[in-house]
Image (cartoon, rainbow, N blue to C red):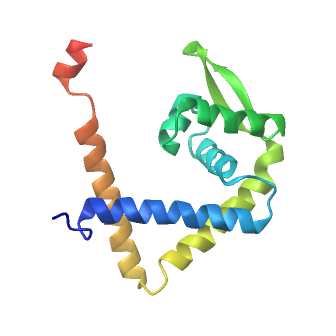
Amino acid sequence: MADPQTFGFLVSDVARLTRALLERRITSAGLGITPGEARALLHIVALEGGRQTRIAERMGVEPMTACGYIDKLEARGLVTREADPDDRRAKQVHATEAAKPLIAALQAESAAMRADILAGLTPEERDATMAALRHAHVNLQALLAPQPEEALAS
C-alpha cells in the first residue's frame, strides 16, 4: 500500500495544490491574463533569455503548449523572441518593459500566496523547509544529470 505521506507524494501534491491555488488567484485578480500565460511569463522572467524548450520543460508542458502561451504574450507586447546566438534555430524569450507592471502584480500575488501557504510556520521552520527543499533539489539535479556512460552512448 502506498503511503501518501512520503516525500514524493507530499511534494507532488503540494506542487499540484500550489499550482491550482496560483491559477485561482490569477483568475480572480483580474490581471487580464490567463493562468497559463501568467505561469509562462513567470518562468520567462526566471529564465531570462531562456529557450522556449527550457520554458516548456520548467512549466511541465509540451513545447507547443508553451509556444502558444508565448505567442499570446508576444502579441500583447509582453515578451520578445530572439535567435539564440549559439543556435540560430532556437529562440530565446525575454520579457519587455511593458511587462514589468504585470510581472510585479504576478509576483505580488505569488508572494501573498506563499505567505498564506506557509502561515503558521515560524521563521525558523520556513528557513528549514526551504533549505531542505533546496538540498533535495540539488540532489535530484545530480541524480538526473547525464552520466559519463550516457554521454558516450549519444
Near-viewer residue (46 or 75): 75
Residue 49 appears in the rendering: no
Q: Residue at x 26, y 28 (%)?
A: 146
The N terminus sits in image quarter? bottom left
The tally of labels here is 0
From the viewer's perspective, is 78 left or right of 89?
Answer: right
From the viewer's perspective, is 108 left or right of 132?
Answer: right
Q: Residue at x 67, y 54 (%)?
A: 35
Residue 68: quadrant of the picture: top right
Q: Position of residue 47 (x, y in %)?
A: 56, 40
Q: Residue at x 54, y 36 (%)?
A: 56
Q: Residue at x 49, y 83 (%)?
A: 119
Near-viewer residue (59 or 140): 59
Q: Position of residue 46 (x, y in %)?
A: 57, 46
The answer to whether 116 is drawn above or below residue 72 in the figure is below
The answer to whether 58 is drawn above or below residue 125 in the figure is above
Q: Position of residue 24 (x, y in %)?
A: 64, 66
The answer to whether 36 is drawn above or below residue 122 in the figure is above
From the viewer's perspective, is 16 left or right of 4?
Answer: right
Q: Position of residue 139 (x, y in %)?
A: 25, 49
Q: Residue furthest front?
A: 1
Residue 66 appears in the rendering: yes
The C terminus sits in image quarter? top left
